[in-house]
Structures are given as C-alpha cells and as structure tokens.
Image: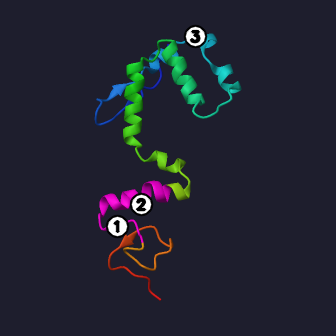
C-alpha cells in the first residue's frame, strides 16, 4: 500500500517533524469522511478543516501533540495572516497605528494639546510635520 507523500511542519520552536500521511492512507475507504465533507455546512469557527482534523484525532491518525506541532509551525510561518480578516478601518486603527507607534515612538495620538486646530482629520501626530497649503 502506498503511504503518500511526506509533509513536514517547520517552526523555530519545533524540529522538522513528518506528518503521519501513511496512517491517513491506511484508513479504510468506508471509514473516511468524504460524503460527510461534501454535505458539511460550515459556520465560523467550524470549518471543513476543523472537521478533518477532529476526525483524524478521533481515529488516532493524528495525536493532539502532532496537531499542536503542525498548528504552531503554521501560525509561526503565517503570523500576520489574520490581518487579511480585518476590515480596512480596523486594519488601520487596530494594527497599523499601533505598529507605527511601536517602530517609531515619535508618532503620537493627536489631540488639541499637540495641534490646537486638530479636528479628527488625521490619525497620528508627528512633530514637525504640518499640513501644506
């Protein structure tokens, strides 16, 4: 029986660990969740991927420790992927402003004390930068 291609999980914290694709191939066809997956309706946070992982853990194909290793490697490799889920406004206010302030402390939240003419027209204040007319 062919065991399939080996897939590897990598992260700084975890060594390169082969995933158990041979055990996945060993599941009898009648025991695979194929028909259920086609009929599966997803609603956040439940998805087909969560369903497949839970199925593999339930069948003993994937241990919870192996799942954590895969998850940690993926999250480590894709640590900014969640930004694509943010709305443009949330991206700017939640992440962008904080990120700019983290890398350049000279950026400040604007207020009337910094700019007496401030009326909410910009998001960050930088000393020495003024509106050109």
Which of the 4 image quarters holds residue 5? Answer: top left
Cα–Cα span, label 3 and label 2: 52 Å
Q: Disc 3 vs disc 2: which is toward the camera?
A: 2
Q: Which mark is residue 28?
A: 3
Question: x and y percent of residue 77 in the render?
Answer: 38, 41
Q: Which residues are drawn in magenta? A: 91-111
> Dot 2 corresponds to which residue?
97
Name above or below for residue 48 compared with residue 25: below
Name above or below for residue 21 compared with residue 43: above
Q: Are marks 1 and 2 in contact (CB under 8 Å)?
A: yes
Which of the 4 image quarters holds residue 7? Answer: top left
Q: Residues within 10 Å of mark 3 (few under 14, many from 20)?
A: few
**Sequence-wise, which precedes: disc 1 or disc 2?**
2
**Sequence-wise, which precedes: disc 3 or disc 2?**
3
Q: Nearer the viewer, residue 96 or 21?
A: 96
Q: Residues within 10 Å of mark 1 (few under 14, many from 20)?
A: some
> Dot 1 corresponds to which residue?
107
Q: Residue at 59% across / 31% down in the picture?
A: 47
Q: Secondary structure at mark 1?
A: strand
Check residue 104 for magenta coloring: yes
């Amino acid at each position: 029986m062919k065991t399939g291609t080996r897939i590897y999980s990598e992260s700084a914290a975890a060594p390169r660990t082969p995933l158990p694709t041979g055990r996945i191939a060993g599941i009898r066809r009648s025991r695979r969740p194929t028909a259920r997956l086609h009929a599966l309706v997803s609603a956040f946070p439940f998805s087909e991927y969560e369903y497949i992982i839970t199925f593999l853990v339930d069948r003993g194909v994937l241990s919870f420790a192996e799942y954590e290793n895969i998850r940690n490697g993926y999250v480590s490799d894709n640590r900014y992927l969640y930004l694509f889920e943010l709305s443009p406004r949330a991206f700017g206010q939640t992440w962008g402003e904080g990120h700019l302030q983290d890398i350049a402390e000279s950026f400040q939240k604007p207020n009337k004390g910094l700019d007496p003419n401030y009326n909410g027209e910009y998001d960050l204040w930088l000393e020495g930068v003024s509106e050109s007319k």
